[in-house]
Amino acid sequence: MINKYLYTLNRKIDKQNMAGLVGEYECKLDSKGRFLFPSGLRKQLSPEANEVFMMNKGFENCLTLYPMNEWEKVSGRLSKLNLFKPKNRMFYRLFHQGAKQLSLDKAGRILIPTDLMKRVGLKREIILTAYNDRIEVWSKDEYLELMEGNMANFADLADEVMGEIPDTDAE
């Protein structure tokens, strides 16, 4: 009994200390556009997400899947935009384009709406890449091409992006 309690407590602490979602997963779409949500990713979801998601068009040629609790945080930030400014309205529209609420079915699958699949050219093989508060859904071929095309610049990109960030653990 005590061991079970400690295990549950440790899992809650681990989830609170996690930096966010992480991982890369290859999946296959069935004929209806569904994929089995990876168990390794499912374990990382916060209970507040309740296996409900929002999906929208991503910044590149991908879809972005937000656990509902993370979508609510993003929406809270967006609600502070001054919508009297044309740039803010345009960003709001572009960010929300095609947004749909989705949830896992009883078999643990997610159905990607056809219009969103067509928008980014998803076929049978997809890759989910999870980082921070979101999960990107890519065509496998396009994702691999993007990653391979940027590997040569990875060291320079790391220096540019991370070079000025102080190490908080060293303080």
Image: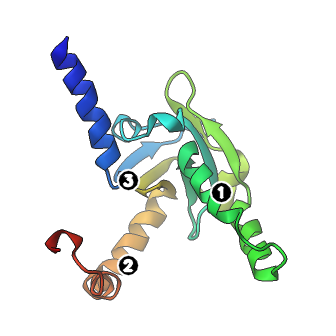
Q: What percent of the width, then of the height, locates residue 78? A: 67, 64
171 with respect to 138 (left or right): left
Which residue is situated farthest in the front direction here?
A: 171
Question: How many residues crowd mark 2 within 10 Å: few (<14), some (14–19), many (20+)?
Answer: few
Alpha-carbon span between mark 1 and mark 2: 33 Å
At mark 3, the secondary structure is: loop
Q: Is residue 171 visible?
A: yes
Q: Residue at coordinates 32% horizontally, 35% vertically from top-left?
A: 12
Who comes first in sequence, dot 3 or dot 2? 3
Who comes first in sequence, dot 1 or dot 2? 1
Count of labels in the image: 3
Of 146 and 52, nearer the camera is 52
Q: Give the numbered dot on residue 163.
A: none
- Residue assigned mark 3: 20
Say whether marks 3 and 1 touch (CB < 8 Å).
no
Q: Residue at coordinates 41% horizontally, 56% vertically from top-left?
A: 129
Q: What percent of the width, then of the height, locates residue 4? A: 21, 18
Q: Is residue 108 above or below residue 168?
A: above
- Residue assigned mark 1: 75
